[in-house]
Amino acid sequence: MKKKKFENVCQSVRLGDDKRIEHQVTHSEGKVVGCSGTEFEVQTDNKQQKWAMENCEVKR
């Protein structure tokens, strides 16, 4: 994902929107709960992880 799209997703999450992303390497899916630097903070099942923006795409 490019930086501009990352920033748009992070802003949407801060405003209360639900955003789901897919990790393009592991094909895991999760809900974005926050952003830090250039990483998404993602909730998957019962754990929270950090995923680099360049490894992610928004789920449609």
Image (cartoon, rainbow, N blue to C red):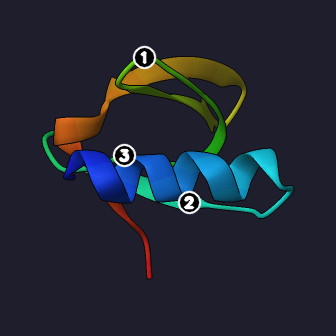
User: Closest to the observer: 54 or 25?
Assistant: 54
Q: How many labels does the image show?
A: 3
Q: Is residue 59 above or below residue 54?
A: below
Q: Are circles 3 and 2 on residues that touch, CB within 8 Å? A: no
Q: Where is residue 8 in the image (x, y as percent from the top left)?
A: 50, 58
| Amino acid residing under circle 3 | Ser
Q: Residues within 10 Å of mark 1 (few under 14, many from 20)?
A: few
Q: Earlier in the sequence, mark 3 or mark 2?
A: 2
Q: Position of residue 10 (x, y in %)?
A: 58, 45
The residue indicated by pointer 3 is 28
Calculate the distance from the C-alpha at mark 3 to the C-alpha at mark 1: 21 Å
Q: Is residue 2 above or below residue 32?
A: below
Calculate the distance from the C-alpha at mark 3 to the C-alpha at mark 2: 11 Å
- Residue for point 64% across, 51% down: 11
- Residue for point 18% across, 50% down: 24
Q: Residues within 10 Å of mark 3 (few under 14, many from 20)?
A: few
Q: Quadrant of the C terminus?
A: bottom left
| Amino acid residing under circle 1 | Gly
User: Closest to the observer: 10 or 45?
Assistant: 10
Residue 20: which disc?
A: 2
Residue 37: which disc?
A: 1
Instruction: Answer whether residue 29 is visible to the viewer in this image.
Output: no
Q: Position of residue 58 (x, y in %)?
A: 40, 65
Q: Earlier in the sequence, mark 3 or mark 1?
A: 3
- Residue for point 35% across, 59% down: 5
Q: In this view, does 27 lie to the left or right of 35?
A: left
Q: What element carries label 3?
A: loop
For this orientation, the residue located farthest to the right is 16
Q: Position of residue 59 (x, y in %)?
A: 43, 71
Q: Is mark 1 on a helix, strand or loop?
A: loop
| Mark closer to the observer (1, 2) | 1
Calculate the distance from the C-alpha at mark 1 to the C-alpha at mark 2: 18 Å
